[in-house]
Image (spheres, rainbow, N blue to C red):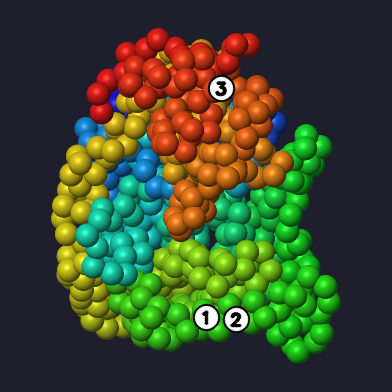
Amino acid sequence: MELLCVLAAVAALFLGCAALTLQAKVPAGMAPLTALSGIVAVFTLAGMAGILYPAAWAVYALCLAGGVWALWPRKGTRPDWKALFTPGSVLFWGMTLAFAVYFFIRQPMATGFDELNLWATAVKVTKVDNSLYSTATLGTPWAVTQNPGLPLLSYFFQFFGSYADWKIYLAYDALYFACFAAVLSALPWQKWRVAVPLAAVLWCTPFFFTIYNHTIYLADTYLTAYGDVPAGLVFGGAVAIWLALRQTDGPRWAVLPVLALAANLKANDFVLSLAAAGLVAVDAWFFCDGPFKQRLLRRTGFAAACFAAPMAVYYLWNIRYVGWLVARNSDSGGVGDTTASLGQVVVNGVKILLGQPVEGFFAEREPQFLQAMADMGHQFWTSDGKLSMIGQGRNVVALILLLFAVAFVVAAGWRLRARIAALAVLSTLCFVGYNLMLALSYGFIFKPFQAEALTDYNRYIYSYYIGWFLMAVGCLATALLPQRDKFIKLVKEKDGPTAIFRVDLHAPRWGLAGQGVVLLLAVAMLLRQGQLVLPQLSVLGFADSEFSDRRNIRAEAELVCSYLTQDDRVFFVSQGDNGEAWFSAVFDFYPILVDYSGVVSEMIGGGGELGLPELKPEEEGPKNYYYHGFTAEELDAIVRGNGCTVLYLQTLDDIFVESYQELFTDGLEAALSGETLLYRVTDAGFAPMEMEVTAS
């Protein structure tokens, strides 16, 4: 049944794309990325307005109506079915349908720490509540302000039927495939010798820039709810779809929702969306088809629209909506805004680079900022920075610039060569700017221990590498196509001048050699991926045992929830937890609320070791590091004060028993004997609940 629900979503998307192609003249290979971007934009606005559920029904109805309108045979005409199936569109629909069936059969599950504490939880909350997860009531101490683009993309595929983890991966992979299709979208069937190896290159791209060591664990690039890979692909896909639109004379507006989506995936990717907007705007404004003054006002308006799309997302979400969330959180006793503003960070960071003095917080953080820059440079230049399948950043940059150079050499006509050269130079400057943004983040936004270890640096930087590589591949694909020069020539004749409209077709230079480069690149990437990622550790061959632990944890959560009501609030006890088990419980129990299980205002809770202050273990480890020292009276007050109605005792130890045995009406006898995992909060104390506990 769940597979049919997902196929219904895919069918609706197909109908919407058919309408875009047959009626709006968006080429079939570009239609999926444009459609998905537009859907996310509508859902974002609707979610902020509190009408996500009816808006979703309206989007599905619009897709159905548009598809019927486009495909319904009219008197004397038939739909142009051939226009719907190009190398790019076939790649998208074939891979999306194949992965829908495959994931339904294999049922992969959310397991990563960040998946459980944000990305997958956000999707489940959005689906269950039919509203933005940022406004949901959760037992967490922070207002969730991460951009909603990816959870809302998944909401489209989750809309029919019940929530399922595998639908998250299908939604995000469909976005991957839409970006791949955009790169291929200008290639006709006659260019299949280029399209086939290029599809292999694109398939390897997420692996190639994220796997940087021989792995013995599941390479979950296509099985992750994280936003870093999608952010990179959409960043590059926006420029690639623009190149294809110009090549095919498609409607230029189709790139605008993609630019908006690029700004709506992660909070720290706004700079990527601006970079993509700038590259598209420069290409459209400077390199026009005809005299420079021709349609200058129209080109200027389009260039402004390119910047307006991501800036509108940033203003509406990050300024207006998040500002409201932070104010609401602060008013309700939360921590409010805890970091310096983006403008202050940029201004003071530039001052430091120019050797000018700074004051206060920024003077204190100046050494941290400068050290982060040095550490990032070390990662880029030396062998310590293995961030991809071909090593450190300098190798990645060399490969990307080499592809730009090949595209420049192969391209037909001076105009296309100039465009490719401009994209290469400007994207390199954007790369420098992106690195500055990361250094500013480590210096003035992240905590000192995060800056010292360059925490998650690989995830942040490979977003740019992936997008940049996609741009270079898009330029190469365009360079391998014939280029048309259109111009009007005035011919002086006997009876006066006559205007002649001419179209000159220029074939690529050394086109066969360019095709050879694409084939060589595909072979090299496939071989390298085969060396580092074993088939049984990829998305196409993972073992069922990869998710056995999560299945057991979820089975216990489902058992426990069967004894609870949606009005219950659960106090979570898992001795020795580092927070991951608590995040897992929050995720698995929802919509039943798992409390922060501590003191929210002091940031004490969210898993850990509970015990009397004097029983804190001396040896280093999770029990020491995450120790929450409460007296029995304090713990009882916290449980009741937080409004908890049930205690879920997932894992006990001697410290908990010795510290709090007196709070339980049976002295924890039922829990220690394995008869129950739940205790009800009563006036007399915490009373055991009768339940059937399966042997683990």
Residue 488 at x, y percent in the picture:
55, 72
Give the alpha-carbon distance from disc 1 to disc 3, as whole Å: 51 Å
Residue 98 at x, y percent in the picture:
24, 40
Residue 640 at x, y percent in the picture:
65, 22
Examine the rendering and report whether any part of residue 199 can be seen: no
Q: Dot 1 corresponds to which residue?
A: 375
Name the disc covering residue 371, or none.
2
Q: Is residue 414 above or below residue 154?
A: below
**Mark toward the start of the polypeptide (1 vs 3):** 1
Mark 3: amino acid: Leu
Structural crowding at the residue carrying mark 1, measured as other residues with C-alpha within 10 Å and reported as few (<14), some (14–19) or many (≥20): some
Residue occupying the far bottom of the picture: 355
**Mark toward the start of the polypeptide (3 vs 2):** 2
In this view, the mark in front (1 or 3): 3
631 with respect to 403 (left or right): right
Q: Quadrant of the C terminus?
A: top left
Q: Dot 3 corresponds to which residue?
A: 663
> Decide: marks 1, 2 in contact (CB < 8 A)?
yes
